[in-house]
Every structure is written in C-alpha cells, then in structure tokens.
Amino acid sequence: MRAAAFDSVDNPSAIEIVDRPEPTPERGEAVVRVKAAALNHRDLWKVKDDRLEEDDLPFVPGADLAGTVVRTGQGVTHVSEGSRVVLCPISTCGTCRFCRDGPENMCERYSSYDGAFAEQARVKADRLVELPESVDFVTAAALPVSYMTAFRMFERGDVSAGDLVFVPGVTGGVGVAVVQLASYLGVETIGTSTSAEKLSRVEAEGLDHAIRTADAGEMRAAVGSLGDVDVTINHLAGPYTHVGTKVLGRDGVMVVCGRTAGRMSEFDAQDLYFGHKRILGSTLGTQPDLEKLVGLVENGQLDPLVDRTYPLAETARAFEEMDSRDVVGKLVVRPQER
Ligand SMILES: NC(=O)c1ccc[n+]([C@@H]2O[C@H](COP(=O)([O-])OP(=O)(O)OC[C@H]3O[C@@H](n4cnc5c(N)ncnc54)[C@H](OP(=O)(O)O)[C@@H]3O)[C@@H](O)[C@H]2O)c1
Ligand SMILES: [Zn+2]
C-alpha cells in the first residue's frame, strides 16, 4: 500500500510516496482503509520543530482519518469489516487520575496519532467512532484535531451564548472551527487575518467582526473598540498573547492551544492581576467530544469547512499550500484517489 512520508527533518515539502506492506492488526487493533485524511499545522511542527530524527525517516504524518474498517485483530467487537469510522486521534494510559476522573485528554501519558496519510492505517479499535451514513468521509476527517480542540477550548473557557470571543488568526483549521461552533452556540466572534478575501469566506461561516491586520498594536485597538472580550482563543501565541489578554474584560479568560507565531510570549502582569484575568492551556479533546461533533454534523448543525481535497500523490503540494497560508478551513487528502 502507498503512504505519503516526510523524507527530511527540516523541509516540510520533502514528501515522498512510499510503498509499505499492508498492516496486520494486533489484539485490540483495526486496520482502516483511509478514504480521507486532513492536514493540521501539528503535522508541520514534526518537521519544523526538530521533533523528527533522521532515524524516524521516512515518517508518515497525519492524525485525522476517516474510512472503512478492512481488518480487525482479536478482541475487537464494536467495529467490524465494512464499518464506516473516524479516528479519535488521542492515546491515553487508562489508569492515571485524568483517565479515571476526566477529561481524558489531560492524561499524564497522552500522545496523538500519526500515520493517516496512507491507503491503510493501523489504529486502536476502541478509538474508532462509527459514522452515520449521512456523514461523508471528507467531512468526518476534517473534524478531529481542529474541531475537538476548539470544542474543548470552549469548555475550558466556559464559553456560553452571548459571550464575545476573540480569535487572532481566524482563517485556519482551529479558527474556522471556533467560528462555526460559536455561530451554532449563539456566541459573537471577532477574528483577524492578513487577507481580506479569506476573512470574507469566514464571515460567510458566521464570523461577526473581521479585522484585517497582523499588527499587534492595530489589532488591540480594533478589538478594544468592539467591547470587552470574554474569551480569547489563542492558537498563535508570540505577540498575540499580549493582545489576547489585554482585550479581555474583568475575569476574562484566554485559552491557549498553539504557538504558530512564536513559542515564547509576554503578558502584562499588572493588567492580569488587577483585571482578575486568567490564562489556561488546552490540548485536543475527548472521544465523547468527537462523538458530539459527529452528532452535530449528522443533525445539520455543523458543516466543517473543507477548502480543497488532493490525491495522495499531491500531499506535498497540500502541505506547501498550508505552509504558505493558502487555505481557509481544512485541506484533505483522499488516499484512495489516483
Ligand atoms: N494543542 C492542540 O491540541 C492543538 C490542536 C490544533 C491546533 N493546534 C495548534 O494551533 C495552531 C493552529 O493550527 P491550525 O491547524 O488551525 O493551523 P492553520 O490552519 O495553519 O492556521 C492558519 C491561521 O494562522 C494564521 N497564521 C499563520 N501563521 C501566522 C503568523 N506567523 N502570524 C500570524 N498569523 C499566522 C493564519 O493567518 P492568515 O489568515 O493571515 O494567513 C491563519 O488565520 C498551530 O500552532 C497548531 O499546532 C494545537
Ligand atoms: Zn492517563
């Protein structure tokens, strides 16, 4: 079977198509024929952030996959050959206090899946969520990383109807997921981008206030003129952490899940303590979160935004386009397409 693999530890465009033996499931595992696999910025970090060693190459990335089960190992009962599924891409120990008491994404030995950009993927069967017939594979593959993360950040930030939510960098996977979930919940959103064209496409998904700038000072003034923000969803970090806390109202909260614009950030300590503001970290979400998201799609309450799809052979182009910020929402690879 074919897979798309990173072939360099420092060049995300160096992706080759490799031939691999068809995987055999071990006890508790299933093999999925991957019909759709979505890109996430996390995949780029594997290459850009020295997380890969030469010995890991070629490395098949990808956490988000949907498809049909083709083989199951011993002890697997809840899915069988032909089941239509999406993978919850988290791996947990099952025994730590967070696995026992929840939420499971806080597991002390948490990790996330890699290997989606392949014709077949071997996964833990109990991490597969069955898909209703009405939910197509491309839509399902768009859900896990971006939408589970956004969903859980809303939980962490206690976002509710009537709140004002601010997302610096609103046009990507997490940004659009926040806007769509906010729209469903009756939450007002402010989002930024460097591109007027991309902003107008996110406005069509429900974004209430679009601000075209990447300049932190301009952003702070423009957001501040719209009122006190209740929750900042921060996947950029860098200079946007300072902006994200400054625009919060009293007792407001900034939830951080990423650092595309820089790992180290500053905030104004005095503004934080006089304003009783909070900063929280958050990573991915739980399997019940994914099940709820699939339910929202099934009921027509959520329609993840997929910008473009690619055959497996064009996975490198898909990553180049994500890296050059030429995307609104999600990019999805279809490994079964030639
Ligand atoms: N912890 C977790 O569980 C988790 C889960 C999901 C994502 N993340 C992290 O969250 C971040 C976003 O992920 P994603 O998949 O949504 O990425 P993405 O789709 O690539 O995000 C694109 C957005 O980021 C903006 N952007 C990109 N580079 C920027 C820069 N240098 N300065 C300012 N804005 C920039 C873009 O702005 P323009 O519109 O101006 O192009 C666009 O709005 C990543 O760092 C990712 O690793 C973490
Ligand atoms: Zn655990």
Image (spheres, rainbow, N blue to C red):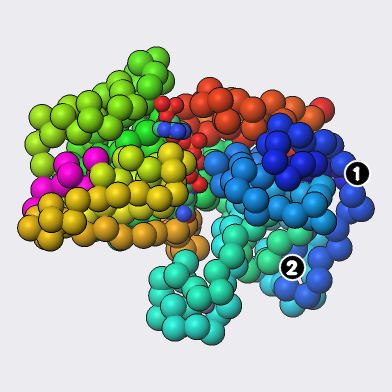
Give neighbour class at mark 2: few <14, some 14-19, many 20+ (Cα, 10 Å): many
Residue 196 drawn above or below residue 183:
above
Q: Position of residue 2 (x, y in %)?
A: 85, 42
Q: Position of residue 49 (x, y in %)?
A: 60, 48
- Pick whichever, 294 or 90, lies toward us: 90
Query: How many numbered circles are shown?
Result: 2
Magenta-span inclusion, residue 155: no
Residue 204 visible in the shown view: no
Q: Report the side of 117 relative to 320 (left or right).
A: right
- Pick whichever, 94 or 108, lies toward us: 108
Q: Position of residue 5 (x, y in %)?
A: 78, 43
Residue under pointer 1: 19
Q: Residue flagged by tag 1: what amino acid is it?
A: Asp
Could you tell me which residue is drawn at 55 percent across and 69 percent down?
A: 110
Could you tell me which residue is drawn at 25 percent across and 50 percent down?
A: 267
Q: Position of residue 140 (x, y in %)?
A: 56, 44
What is the span of residues highlighted in magenta in the rendered image? 243-251
Q: CA distance from mark 1 to mark 2?
A: 21 Å
Q: Is label 1 within 8 A of ligand 1 (CB to nearest ligand atom)? A: no
* Foreground disc of the pair 1, 2: 1
Could you tell me which residue is drawn at 44 percent across and 83 percent down?
A: 97
Residue under pointer 2: 29
Secondary structure at badge 2 equals strand
Magenta-span inclusion, residue 246: yes
Give neighbour class at mark 1: few <14, some 14-19, many 20+ (Cα, 10 Å): few
Q: Report the side of 130 relative to 52 (left or right).
A: left
Compare marks 1 and 2 and give the one earlier in the sequence.
Answer: 1
Residue 204 drawn above or below residue 65:
above
Q: Residue flagged by tag 2: what amino acid is it?
A: Glu
Could you tell me which residue is drawn at 79 percent across and 30 percent down?
A: 313
Label 1 close to label 2 by CB (< 8 Å): no
